[in-house]
Structure formats: structure tokens, C-alpha cells
Amino acid sequence: MTANSLLPLYTERPDREGRDRLEILTALIGAPSFDPIFRGMLVRVPQDHPAYQGGCVVGACKRVRSGGADLCSNHLQRWAKGSGSGTTRAEFLTAAQPLPRAEFEREGLCVICPDRPAEPRTDLRLRRHHYRSWKYYVAPRDSGADFQQWAADQEPREGYGNCKVTVCPGLTESPLG
């Protein structure tokens, strides 16, 4: 059988095209060379995976890498300060202390818009729009700004409902769901 003899299959039986492709994909995923972490419904890549490493390179640091770097965001900031003072990379990595896994609140609600999720990286419990607005408001005033007064002047907005991603139990952040 040649490759050309398979071509008429889809023209004669177009109903088989999707099924045939699914069977091929299933066979490829079932192959011993296919990484088993990609076989489940949810893909959870461990930090110490040999090909897709996501952990910080500092000793037993439990934090994930930042962007395209090989250090977590905390160690990356410390390295930036250390390298400016003449510390070598080897000295920095030897002296750096591993950090525990970072825990962020999964999802809180914005104190102004109760139907929208708050930004997890802030203890002010504001959604991204309000957090940026607060930063813009407080910048010229330094620490003299009153958060309660500012929050009382803000307009709450309606939420967009639950996230449409099957595995996400949270609220959606945008009109796209």
C-alpha cells in the first residue's frame, strides 16, 4: 500500500476523517516514549521535571522560576542587588537561602466590586483596575492618602459570572469568560 492509495479514503468516506485522526492521536499518546504527565485531563508539571524544569535553581528553593530566568522572583531581585555590588553568580548561589513555597490566596473578592475577583498579589483586595487606580491616586500623595475615603468614591461594576474553564471554580475577570 502506498501513500497515494490512502488519499481516496477521505474523499470516499469523509465521515472517517475525524475518527481516524483521533485513533492516531490515541496511539501516539499511548506510546511508551510519550511523557505520562501529559496523559491526564489536567497537566501538572513537577518543578524537578527533567525537560520542563520550573523550579528556582537555588538549593532547595520551593518557588517557581520567574519569566525566562532560572531564579524565582525573590532570588532574581536579590541577585540584581548582589551583582551590582560585585558579587559573582557562584558566590550568590552558594550564599542564597532557599525559600518556602509561596502561598497566594486563591481568590478573594474586590472590596469595591463584590462580583469580581481581587488581584491575588495584593493585600488590599482590589481587582486589577482598582489596584492600578489606587496606585495612581496614592503616588503624588505618598503615604498621606486615605484608603477608606478613596474606596468610598469608587464606582462598583458588575461581574461577568463564573469562569468558563471547566476546572476553574472562580469568577471570570473579563467579558470573554
Image (cartoon, rainbow, N blue to C red):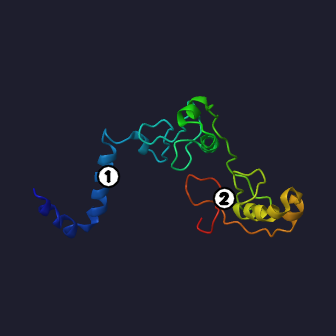
* Residue 5 or residue 109, whichever sits in front: 109
- Residue at position x 68%, y 45% in the image: 104
Is 26 left or right of 137, judged from the image as shown?
left
Q: Which residue is mark 1?
A: 25
55 in relation to 28, above or below? above
Q: Amino acid at mark 1?
A: Leu
Q: Quick one: 133 or 10, which is closer to the camera?
A: 133
Residues at marks 1 and 2, CA–CA distance in whole angstroms: 33 Å
Counting residues from the start of the chain, the first of labels 1 and 2 encountered is 1
Which of 51/125 is in front? Answer: 51
Tell me where residue 113 appears, x and y as whole percent.
77, 63
Count the numbered circles shown: 2
| Three-letter code, disc 2 | Leu
Q: Are marks 1 and 2 in contact (CB under 8 Å)?
A: no
Quarter-of-image position of residue 12: bottom left
Q: Residue furthest front?
A: 86
Q: Which residue is painted at 34% across and 42% down in the image?
A: 34
Q: Quadrant of residue 137?
A: bottom right
Q: Quadrant of residue 35?
A: top left
The answer to whether residue 129 shows anywhere in this view is yes
Residue 80 place in picture, x, y as percent = 61, 44
For the point 82% across and 64% down, which residue is it? 140
Image quarter hosting the C terminus = bottom right
According to the picture, the residue beneath numbered tag 2 turns out to be 171
- Which numbered tag is attached to residue 56? none
- Image quadrant containing the N terminus: bottom left
Q: Secondary structure at mark 1?
A: helix
Q: Residues within 10 Å of mark 2 (few under 14, many from 20)?
A: many
The x, y position of residue 82, in whole percent, is 62, 39
Q: Is residue 113 visible?
A: no
Percent x, y of residue 31? 30, 42
Assign a secondary structure to mark 2. Answer: loop
